[in-house]
Amino acid sequence: DSGVTQTPKHLITATGQRVTLRCSPRSGDLSVYWYQQSLDQGLQFLIQYYNGEERAKGNILERFSAQQFPDLHSELNLSSLELGDSALYFCASSVEQIPYEQYFGPGTRLTVT
Amino acid sequence: QQQVKQSPQSLIVQKGGISIINCAYENTAFDYFPWYQQFPGKGPALLIAIRPDVSEKKEGRFTISFNKSAKQFSLHIMDSQPGDSATYFCAASIIGNTPLVFGKGTRLSVIA
């Protein structure tokens, strides 16, 4: 158990809908990262937040957005969902002193029908 | 452009054998090379990592070999066990510029 929690575990929704994925980092970790894992693209970095501020952006679509709250939990919002958005979404966290060691949560499996 | 190329895609090894997974990178600025292990239905778990100032790092049955001039690094699993059956991902990043770039993964099956 990495100490990173994600909810929900599974999510099934229809095209065009909007969903919110939630992540709580390990106790003491200030950074949160979001990744998308699909069969054809592998693990793709989406976005990073550090202590409430956006730190780095990767291959995140404009339909997707994220934020980190004062209690350090983070939410990833996916809107106007398409079939191709079906994937596993992982959150990872790291401690400030060793920012490169990232610990992953169990993921949220999103299925868009 | 794939910055980290991982091979093979899948690997079958006999119990007790050595599993070897290779990765090659392009960006010479990368200075942190971790390996992650992922079991079905779970998130990737940090297994072992190396910095480019050493050529090898060993933790139990897991060893990373690093060849800076060839821009390659590999994971060796000695005395492979059925419990090692998982998908392994190599990754790379630039410390201070934290996003990890992952290889596509290797599905390892250790058979008795």
Image (cartoon, rainbow, N blue to C red):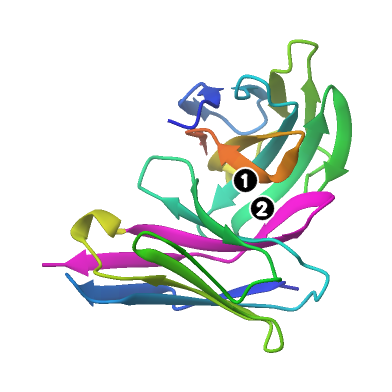
Q: Is residue B52 magenta?
A: no
- Residue position for label 2: A44
Q: Using the image, determine if residue A42 lies above or below residue B26.
A: above
- Residue position for label 1: A36
Q: Which residue is rendered at x = 56% and y = 49% of the image?
A: A37
Quarter of the figure with residue B59:
bottom left
> Residue B9: x and y, percent?
44, 74
Quarter of the figure with residue B26:
bottom right
Q: Is residue B111 magenta?
A: yes
Whichever of callouts 2 and 1 sits on the residue coming sooner in the sequence is 1
Q: Secondary structure at mark 2?
A: strand
> Residue B8: x and y, percent?
44, 78
What's under tag 1, amino acid-wise?
Gln
Q: Which residue is rendered at x = 80% and y = 23% of the image?
A: A67
Q: Is residue B37 left or right of residue A16?
A: left
Q: Is residue A38 left or right of residue A33?
A: left
> Dot 1 falls on which chain?
A
> Residue B45: x and y, percent?
48, 45
| Viewport quadrant of the N terminus of chain A | top left
Label 2 with label 1: CB-CB less than 8 Å: yes
CA gap between label 2 and label 1 equals 5 Å
